[in-house]
Image: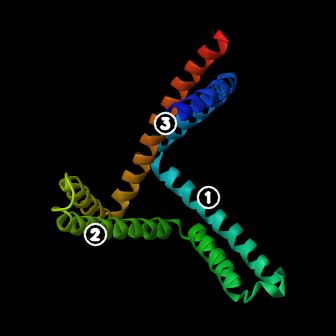
Amino acid sequence: MAISSGLGSAVVASRVLPALAHHWWVFLLRGVVGVAFGLVAFFYPVATLYTFIVFYAVFSIVDGVFAFVSAVRGKENMGPRWWLALIGILGVVAGLAAYLWPGFTAIALLTLIGIWALVNGVVEIVGAIRLRAEIDNEWLLLIHGILSVLFGLIVLARPSGGALALIWFIAAFALVSGSVLIVLSFRLKGLASKA
């Protein structure tokens, strides 16, 4: 079984790799966009956060309109459609609120993230204590739970600092991810030139 699956993956790799190598420039483009986004997010974190909120607002409004239209134009055999209309209305209201009050939206979002991290951390700490006789290295779960609780408390105590930290985290991810894609693109380009 292992031999046949190994041969199968080799056959798939032999077909996929030339196609990837031929389109190496797509990975380069994705990498450059990722690095550019990461740099903009690092140097302009407030503008980046505002842009995220505006994109969320537009998405929420469009999604709400489509949900409402689906409820109004839906067929009778769909069952009760009031819940879809309600979701649509709430989506539009949430989108408008996010657009009109972006600062409040950012604080509300970060408060939810802080609460989630706090609850998640407490659950992990309790789980690590209860599982200490059942699993090895439960201390890793315990440490993760403690870090999650600390993160949650910091975000709840200083949401504006949490917003900045979140944007910088996203920016760091974009920079690293973009750099990896750029390196990969040049390796694929090398393979394409050999083929």
Three-letter code for the amino acid on which mark 2 is drawn: Val
Secondary structure under the numbered disc 2 in the rendered image: helix
Pointer 3 residue: 177
Which quadrant holds residue 119? bottom left
Residue 32 seen from this side: no
Secondary structure under the numbered disc 1 in the rendered image: helix
In the image, which disc is placed on residue 55?
1
Foreground of the two, 191 or 120: 191
Foreground of the two, 26 or 35: 26
How far across and down, in percent of the image, does residue 193 sit?
66, 11
78 is higher (above) or lower (below) than 8: below
> How far apart are labels 3 and 1 at the CA level?
22 Å
How far across and down, in percent of the image, does residue 163 sit?
40, 57
Three-letter code for the amino acid on which mark 3 is drawn: Ser
Which residue lies at the image location 84% right of the left edge and 83% below the top edge?
75
Foreground of the two, 115 or 145: 145
Three-letter code for the amino acid on which mark 1 is drawn: Phe
Q: Residue furthest top?
A: 194
Secondary structure under the numbered disc 3 in the rendered image: helix
Mark 2 or 3, nearer chain start: 2
Which residue lies at the image location 47% right of the left edge and 52% below the top edge?
46
Which residue lies at the image location 72% right of the left edge and 89% below the top edge?
80
How far across and down, in percent of the image, does residue 69 sit?
79, 77
Pointer 2 residue: 123
Does 184 sit left or right of 109 as displayed? right
Does 148 sit left or right of 56 as displayed? left
